[in-house]
Image: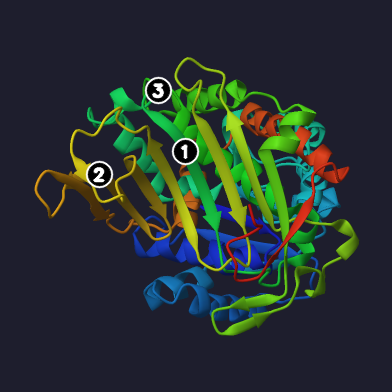
C-alpha cells in the first residue's frame, strides 16, 4: 500500500469537499497508519501552517461526521508545497524520493496533459500511480492523446481515471440484484425489459462552479462519464469475475454496442435545455445566464437527455434513457428498470396498475419494486410496492476511491479504451449541439425541466 499522496490543486474545492474527508474516513476505519503522508500543492503562497488551518476548517465543514481524532491525524500528516505543474523541476521536487507516490491531479481537465508531461519529465519513483478526475479530456482526440502521454509514464494498471459514482454502494446493489438473484437475471433482457431510465436530476444550481461548468455543460459533466458508467453496469453481460479485467472488459463491450448517432438521431433522440429565473422551494433563483462567471454566448446546457439503442442480442428493442438537469424542482437520482406489461390481466383493476418497475435509488441509496397485488375489492388487482433501504456503506465514495488508489486496485477506475469509447458515443451529439442543430429549450428553475 502506498503511504504517500501528492495532491496537485491542493487548496481547491475537490480537495476540500471530498479528498480530505475521504482520507479522514480511511483513517477512522483503520486503513491509514501513522506512516501516511499527504503533500498538497498549487501555485498559491501558502505555508504548511496556513494550509493545516485551512484543512482543519474544511474537515470540520465537510467531514464533521468523522471522529475528531481521525481529522486531526490527517491534518497532522499534511504539508503544503508551492508548485507549478508546468515546470518539471518543481514537480520533481514533490514526487522524488521516499518510495512510490500517488499523484492526484485535482486540476481543471485542461491542465491534465501539461501535468502528465511534467510528471513524465520529472520521473516518478517505481510503482507510483497517477489519478485523474473526470472529464477525461475534452473530446475523443484529446482523450486519445492523453492516453498516449500516460502510457509513456506508467503502465495502464497504475493509471486511475476515477469516477466516484462507481464507488457508491449502488454499484454493488445493481450488480448484486442482477447477478446474484435468479429471479432477475433470466428476465434481464429486451424480451422482458422495455425501458431503462438513468437519472440524475438535482435542485442544486451552480454552487460556485461556473468556471468549470460553463465550459463543460450537462452532457460532458454528467452523461459522458457518470451516467454512461451506470449504463454499463446495468447492460453488461455477466462477467466471469469482478476482477478488474473481467469487469472492465464487459463495460467496454456495452459502450461498443451503442448505436452511433446520425444527424437525424441527434435531432430525434436528444434534448437540451437551460434554466431561466424561477423559484426552488423558498428561494428565488436567477437565470443561468445571470449567474456569476457564466458567459451567455457559450449557450451551455444545464439539462441533457439522450436515448440510446444497443445493438446486441440481449438489448435490441430496449430504450435506454439518460437524463440530468440542474435547478429542477426535485432531486431524483435513480436507475429505473421498467418491465414490459403482461399480455393480459384476467381480473379488473383500479386503473393504477402498470408495468413492474425496479428502482435503484442513488441518493439516498435504496431499492423499490413495484408489483401488482390483490385489490381491496374481490377479484381485482392493485399496485403494491416493496421497499428496502440499503445499509450505509463503510466508506464514503471518495474514501473508497482513495483506498483503491493507495492499495492499487483499479477495478472501479476507467480504463483507457473505455474513456475513448465514452467520447465516441457523445461526440456526434456535442457536434450537433455546438452547431445549434438541436434547439436549446428554456425551463424555469424549480420546474421538471423542458416541456415535452
Asked if residue 406 can be seen in this view, the reply is no
Q: Look at 37% across and 47% down and name the residue there.
A: 359
Marks 1 and 3 in Cβ contact (< 8 Å): no
372 is higher (above) or lower (below) than 42? above
Along the viewing direction, whichever of 1 and 328 lies nearer the viewer: 328
Q: How many labels does the image show?
A: 3
Element type at marker 3? loop
Q: Mark 1 points at which residue?
A: 196
Q: Look at 25% across and 44% down and name the residue there.
A: 371
Tell me, for residue 371, which label it has, or none: 2
229 is higher (above) or lower (below) than 205? above
Front: mark 1 or 3: 1
Element type at marker 2? strand
Q: Where is residue 224 in the image (x, y as percent from the top left)?
A: 65, 42
Mark sitting earlier along the chain (1/2):
1
Along the viewing direction, whichever of 173 and 120 lies nearer the viewer: 173
Q: Residues within 10 Å of mark 3 (few under 14, many from 20)?
A: some
Q: Look at 61% across and 22% down and name the residue there.
A: 256
Asked if residue 92 can be seen in this view, the reply is yes
Q: Where is residue 225 in the image (x, y as percent from the top left)?
A: 62, 43
Marks 1 and 2 in Cβ contact (< 8 Å): no
Q: Mark 3 points at which residue?
A: 239
Amino acid at each position: 500500500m502506498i503511504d504517500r499522496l501528492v495532491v496537485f490543486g491542493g487548496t481547491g474545492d475537490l480537495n476540500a469537499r471530498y479528498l480530505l474527508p475521504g482520507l479522514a474516513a480511511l483513517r477512522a476505519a483503520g486503513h491509514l497508519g501513522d506512516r501516511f503522508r499527504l503533500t498538497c500543492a498549487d501555485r498559491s503562497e501558502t505555508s504548511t501552517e496556513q494550509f493545516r488551518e485551512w484543512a482543519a476548517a474544511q474537515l470540520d465543514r465537510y467531514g464533521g461526521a468523522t471522529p475528531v481524532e481521525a481529522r486531526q491525524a490527517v491534518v497532522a500528516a499534511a504539508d503544503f508545497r508551492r508548485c507549478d505543474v508546468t515546470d518539471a523541476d518543481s514537480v520533481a521536487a514533490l514526487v522524488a524520493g521516499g518510495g512510490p507516490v500517488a499523484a492526484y491531479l485535482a486540476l481543471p481537465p485542461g491542465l491534465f496533459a501539461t501535468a502528465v508531461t511534467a510528471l513524465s519529465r520529472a520521473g516518478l519513483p517505481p510503482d507510483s500511480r497517477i489519478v485523474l478526475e473526470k472529464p477525461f479530456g475534452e473530446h475523443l482526440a484529446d482523450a486519445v492523446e492523453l492516453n498516449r502521454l500516460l502510457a509513456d509514464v506508467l503502465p495502464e494498471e497504475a493509471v486511475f481515471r476515477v469516477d466516484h459514482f462507481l464507488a457508491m454502494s449502488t454499484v454493488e446493489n445493481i450488480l448484486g440484484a442482477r447477478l446474484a438473484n435468479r429471479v432477475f437475471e433470466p428476465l434481464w433482457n429486451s424480451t422482458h425489459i422495455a425501458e431503462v431510465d438513468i437519472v440524475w436530476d438535482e435542485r442544486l444550481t451552480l454552487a460556485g462552479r461556473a468556471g468549470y461548468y460553463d465550459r463543460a455543460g450537462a452532457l460532458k459533466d454528467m452523461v459522458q462519464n457518470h451516467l454512461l458508467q451506470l449504463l454499463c453496469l446495468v447492460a453488461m453481460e455477466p462477467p466471469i469475475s469482478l476482477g478488474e479485467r473481467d469487469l472492465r472488459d464487459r463495460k467496454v463491450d456495452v459502450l461498443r454496442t451503442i448505436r452511433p448517432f446520425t444527424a437525424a438521431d441527434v435531432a430525434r433522440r436528444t434534448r437540451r435545455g437551460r434554466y431561466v429565473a424561477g423559484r426552488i422551494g423558498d428561494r428565488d433563483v436567477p437565470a443561468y445566464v445571470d449567474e456569476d462567471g457564466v458567459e451567455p454566448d457559450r449557450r451551455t446546457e444545464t439539462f441533457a437527455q439522450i436515448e440510446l439503442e444497443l445493438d446486441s442480442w440481449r438489448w435490441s428493442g430496449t430504450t435506454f434513457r439518460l437524463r440530468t438537469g440542474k435547478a429542477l424542482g426535485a432531486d431524483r437520482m435513480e436507475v429505473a428498470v421498467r418491465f414490459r406489461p403482461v399480455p393480459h390481466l384476467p381480473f379488473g383493476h383500479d386503473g393504477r396498475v402498470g408495468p413492474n418497475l425496479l428502482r435503484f435509488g442513488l441518493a439516498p441509496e435504496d431499492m423499490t419494486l413495484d408489483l401488482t397485488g390483490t385489490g381491496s375489492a374481490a377479484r381485482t388487482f392493485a399496485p403494491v410496492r416493496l421497499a428496502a433501504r440499503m445499509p450505509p456503506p463503510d466508506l464514503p465514495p471518495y474514501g473508497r476511491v482513495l483506498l483503491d488508489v493507495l492499495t492499487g486496485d483499479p477495478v472501479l477506475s476507467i480504463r483507457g479504451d473505455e474513456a475513448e469509447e465514452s467520447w465516441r458515443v457523445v461526440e456526434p451529439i456535442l457536434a450537433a449541439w455546438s452547431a445549434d442543430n438541436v434547439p436549446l429549450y428554456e425551463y424555469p428553475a424549480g420546474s421538471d425541466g423542458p416541456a415535452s
